[in-house]
Amino acid sequence: MMEDVRKNSPEEMAEQVRVLAEQLKRAGRKDLLLRAIGVPLLEELRIEAARAKLSRLVVTKDYRIILADYDNKEVELTPVHKAVYLLFLAHPEGIEFKKLRDYRDELARYYMATARQMDKEAIMESVDMLVDPLNNSINEKCSRIKKVFLDMMDEYTASYYIISGHTQKHIVGSSRIWYERLKVITLPRALLKPHIPSIFPFP
């Protein structure tokens, strides 16, 4: 059987996989199909499927956020929402909300860049609210950003553009396990134009 498969072209093998997958679905054995594919490969396939629908995200010199492959539609965000979004774009590794204070100065720079006419004292007051772990301001801003993207695209596609949760498991030695609850934008950075960090020049 394996020898016959090796003689087949990739297209023929793909058709065999399609037929077998359909047979398993009809038999009500999606569990076996999932086991055969494996979760890591399933996630790779999910990303590959999404790539066809994902648009390049362009951040212009004046900090407009554009979906280049959606007829250059602009993502309409207020300066404070843009500042939050730019911060998370700049950190594909993710940021824990409880550690936002470590990014206070960077967030303030983004806010000042996107709200040039706004009073600096008012900006810093807003930034301090955003990085305060006891204040709900950052959650409110992320919820608003999510709504803007959901108004522009389906939920599955939007999941790559919004600031979403990601829990990372860490194992120290043989007994200690701890979890890092990160917030990330999962958009493949190859779709970000121009690439980080060049889109964030400050005078």
Image (cartoon, rainbow, N blue to C red):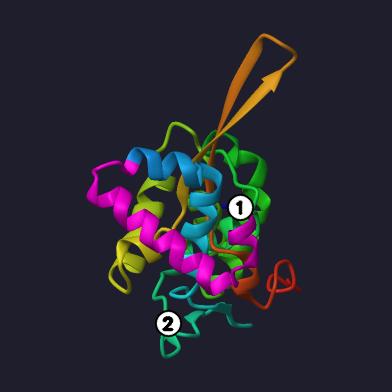
Label 2 crowd (10 A; few <14 / some 14-19 / many >=20):
some
As for residue 17 lying within the magenta part, the answer is yes
- Kindly identify the amino acid type of the residue bearing the numbered disc 1: Met
As for residue 195 lying within the magenta part, the answer is no
Residue placed under numbered mark 2 in the picture: 74
- Relative to residue 40, is residue 146 depicted above or below? below
- Relative to residue 196, is residue 74 depicted above or below? below
- Relative to residue 87, is residue 176 depicted above or below? above
Q: Is mark 2 on a helix, strand or loop?
A: strand
Residue 203 drawn at (x, y percent): 76, 74
- Relative to residue 184, is residue 53 depicted above or below? below
Residue 129 seen in the current view: no
Q: What whole-number distance in Å separates the C-alpha atoms at marks 1 and 2? A: 51 Å
Residue 7 drawn at (x, y percent): 64, 67
- Precedes in sequence: disc 1 or disc 2: 1
Which numbered disc covers residue 2?
1
Q: Are circles 1 and 2 on residues that touch, CB within 8 Å? A: no
Q: Main secondary structure of the magenta part?
A: helix
Which numbered disc covers residue 51?
none
What's drawn in magenta, residue-wise? 3-30
Give the quarter of the image for residue 173: top right
Q: What element carries label 1?
A: helix
Give the quarter of the image for residue 148: bottom left
- Kindly identify the amino acid type of the residue bearing the numbered disc 2: Glu
